[in-house]
Each structure stands twice: as structure tokens, then as C-alpha cells.
Image (cartoon, rainbow, N blue to C red):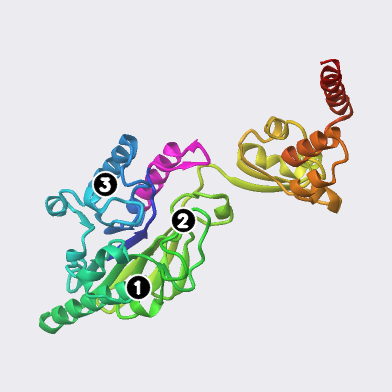
Amino acid sequence: MRILHTSDWHLGRSFHGAGLLDAQHGFIDALLQTVTTEHVDVVLIAGDVYDRALPSVDAVTLFDDAVVRLREAGATVIATSGNHDSALRLGFGSRLLGHAGLHLRTQVADLDTPILLDGGGFTVAVYGLPYLEPRMVAETLGVEAPGHPPVIRAAMDRVRADLAARRAVSSQPIRSLAMAHVFAAHGQPSDSERELSIGGLDIVPIEEFADVDYAALGHLHGRQRLAETIRYSGSPIAYSFSEANHRKGAWLLDVTADGLASIEPVDWPAAKALRVLRGRLEDLLADESLADAAGAWCQVTLTDRDRPAQAMERLRTRFPGTLVLYFEPEGRPAAVERTYRDRLAAAENPLQVCTGFIDHVRQRPPSGPEAELLARILDGAASSRVAR
């Protein structure tokens, strides 16, 4: 049986104000091509189908279209809710949809009720753990300790108990997969994930997933291997510039009666490249090695001693896809880096107060003509007071 592990589709998300609907349509096309060419039997979505609890009409339409196309290609779809999803909304009609080949696991009560898949001489039991917010599910799971680890441990105890009971009475081998939307220990986060908690109470030991043949994890957006059978698929497209070097895709599993036969990465091309640029404005505009960045989305950090005028406008003449601009001046004198309070205290006259304020706000002192204009305005104000 061939199973494709995906997660974190985040349908409806934008990228620093730029729409991603076309890129997400492209991902669905790539997904369908993989399902068709690799003869995938089952597609897993380990949480965060949508980016918001109230997804847009376009996002819901795209998911509906994706599921229909996957079913027409012959793949069963199994999805769990993530911390961005509304479990109630995503899970609406789940019992009916299950008969049509779309299996949704969004409720605590269903986490130890597996989707049973016939492998021809063996069974694959897929357990779907929705995102489990400790404050909401601790009482149901009989947990008193704070944080995610005890909640996941209690959930997996239920999974282990159900799996043991089924294997005890089954006449054929039962292979097991668990889907979970968690921050597992040793995982590498990126900037686009929402924190699950504060103070490390969200980090779940990977040993909690050691008793299943494969753990298909979601939440972290980089595809990564925590152990041979415990992995994140990552998001199918990049959702932050911290993911500029990620290789986006999924994991393709071959499961047999004897267990997990193979795990291979599947790569999907990016709809638009990401570039992270750093340097002085004039150097970036003149650097011929950055020609490929002209067609990419760019995050730029300018290191000019003084903040250049119209920096974003000038950058976009060469890099029209510049979405994020930071300033980290290098080589500015220590006096320039003083706090505004220090500058105000050191000012000897009103003109220094004004020029210091301008330098503080825009990280560039007034030009000669600007300083002259300020001086004339201040002199005029002083003369008016004297005249009265």
C-alpha cells in the first residue's frame, strides 16, 4: 500500500500581503500528479488544512476541488484538524464523508477509532489525533499535569490499547500509523508556525510515537526526520522567508504485511522563488549575480550607514517582488545609536532637537537643504515670539 504523508496546507494563507491562491492551486496540481504517477492509495493531511478557523470561500472551494480530484484518482483521503483549523467546522459531516472516502478526525472521542484500510492480506490502521489543546481536552483524557506531553501520552495510550486489542483477535497482520499535529522534540521550527504554548510546555518527546509503524506529524513547516519512522512532511509551499532553503514536498511510504518497506521524499517545485538579500543599497542594485532575484519574492536587509531615501521604491526597480525590508546599519558611530532620550538630553538648542528626532525616526540625518529649512522655520518661530 502506498501512502503519501502531507500536512500544513494552510489553504487561504497570504505571504506578507501577497496572495497565495495561485501557488496553492499549483500545489494541488503537483499533488495530483504525484498521486497518479506514483499510484498512491492514501493521502494523509496531518492538520492545518486551512489557515484560519473561518476559512475564505476560495479556500473551502479549493479543498473541495482537491478532495474530489484525489478521489477520482483513486486515493483515500485522511485528514486531521490542526491548531489553525476549527475542529467543529472541518469535521462537519465526517461520518457521511467517510463513506465517500474522505475520513476526518477532529474529535477527541474518535482518536482511538482507526480508519482501517485493506492491504490485501493485511490491514493498515490509521489513527488520527486532532490538535489537542491541553486546556480543552485534559479532563476528557484524565490528565492533570500541564502542557502537551501528558495529553499526547494519554492519547497514545488509548491508541496503543486499541491497537493491541485489534491485533489480539485479528487473523492477519495489522500495521499502524498515527497522525498528530504537535511540536515534537528535536524538530526544527520556522517563522511561519504559530506557537502552541509558552515555556516549552508544548514539546512532546518522540518516544510517545515509538509503538506505531509510522508517525505522520504536522505543525512544523520544514520536511524533517526525527527518527526513521517519525517524520514531519512540512508545508507544501513556503509561508515565510525562513523557509527559503526548504525543499517542499511530502513523504511517500510503502507499507507491506511485514511493516514499513520504504520511505522516500517527494519534491514539489516552488511557484515562486524566495530570496533573502543583505547589503548596501547601491551594491545590491549593481550586483550582477543577483539577476535571478528579479523574479523572486525578496526579503532585503539594508546595511547602509544611513537609511537611504526611498529605499523600497528603488529596490523594486530591480527586485519588484520585494515584500519585506529591514534596516541594520553597519559602521554607524556609537553616538548615532544612542536612544532618543539620550539625544534629547544632549541637545544644546532647538535645531539639534529637531535634527536628532529626524535621525532617530528614519535612521538618516537631515540633508543640508533639510537642515537649512528647519533652521529658517525655527528662526521664524523665534522672531514671531519676539514680535509679540
Against 277, is 42 above or below? below
Quadrant assignment for the C terminus? top right
The residue lying toward the viewer, choosing from 160 and 150, is: 150
Residue placed under numbered mark 2 in the picture: 193
Residue placed under numbered mark 3 in the picture: 67
* Residue drawn where x is 34% and y is 80% of the image: 210
Q: Is disc 3 placed on a helix, strand or loop?
A: helix
Residue placed under numbered mark 1 in the picture: 146
**Could you give the CA–CA distance between mark 1 and mark 3, rounded to whole angstroms?**
37 Å
Occupied quadrant, residue 117: bottom left
x%, y% of residue 66?
30, 44
Chief SS of the magenta region: helix
Amino acid type at image mark 3: Val
Which label's residue is closer to the chain start, 1 or 3? 3
x%, y% of residue 336?
82, 47
Quadrant assignment for the N terminus? bottom left
**Could you give the CA–CA distance between mark 1 and mark 2, rounded to whole angstroms?**
22 Å
Against 384, is 233 above or below? below
Amino acid type at image mark 2: Glu
Q: Residues within 10 Å of mark 3 (few under 14, many from 20)?
A: some
* Residue lying furthest front: 388
